[in-house]
Image (tube, rainbow, N blue to C red):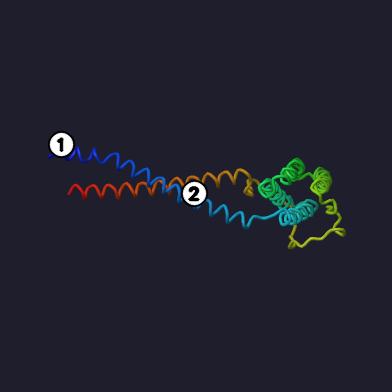
Amino acid sequence: MILPTIALIVGTLPVAKASNDEANLQSLQKALLALQIRVETLEAIKTTFTSLMPNFSERFHVMHRAGEAGDWAVAGHEVAEMKRLTALSSYIDAKNGALMQGMMGPRLDALEAAIKHGNLGKFEAALGETVSSCNACHVASGSPFIQVVLDAKDSISLRHPHALAKSEMADGHSHGGPAMMQKNMESMQKSMKNMMSGESEQDHHKQGEGEEEHHD
């Protein structure tokens, strides 16, 4: 009685493996379909440079005024967001994003260093250099008519007012730059792997139940 039972179990092994492979393939197909739908949805609502730059310029405006007031916490908050937007720019437009990163990256680093040390002189110098880079970038991208200025009388701001007071730049304030994007990607991959593993275990459990019924 034992030998026929062993033969029966051994005889079902290739079938079980094939069934398991098919279940894994189906799980993978489901995961890929879900990912495709998500990507298509995000592509449909993806921002453009036309909507990115007003956000960027308003943050520049607030950073400028905060630095003048010695409110380095607000200035640091805004420059961190400007760096995040710059890092994301290549995903919005590869050509203009590369241009923006190349021209603005070093300027934003200089501003951040001045803000971190609360050095008004270096901040104002970095501010002037940043404005020059902004306008040069506009010329290079085909929009020479868009010119950034520091004089409030010659500019427009639609951003809500900020109550500014002297402060120091906050440490550890993250704005979801490249490191955060990588972390999110790893989290998504882990979720997909867990989902596939869970479905595979369920299929294996169901298959085991079927074999027990067959043996009975």
N-terminal-most mark, 2 or 1: 1
Total numbered labels placed on residues in the image: 2
Quadrant of the image occupied by residue 20: top left
Residue at position x 78%, y 44% in the image: 119
* Circle 1 residue: 3
Residue 94 in the figure: left or right of residue 192: right
Residue at position x 63%, y 58% in the image: 45
Residue 5 in the figure: left or right of residue 194: left
* Circle 2 residue: 32
Q: Secondary structure at mark 1?
A: helix
Q: Are marks 2 and 1 in contact (CB under 8 Å)?
A: no
Residue 169 visible, this orientation: no
- Specify the quadrant that holds the N terminus: top left
Q: CA distance from mark 2 to mark 1?
A: 44 Å
Residue 62 in the figure: left or right of residue 152: left
Residue at position x 30%, y 48% in the image: 205
Counting other residues with Cα less than 10 Å from the Cα at mark 1, is it few (<14), some (14-19), or many (20 or more)?
A: few
Amino acid marked by disc 2: Leu
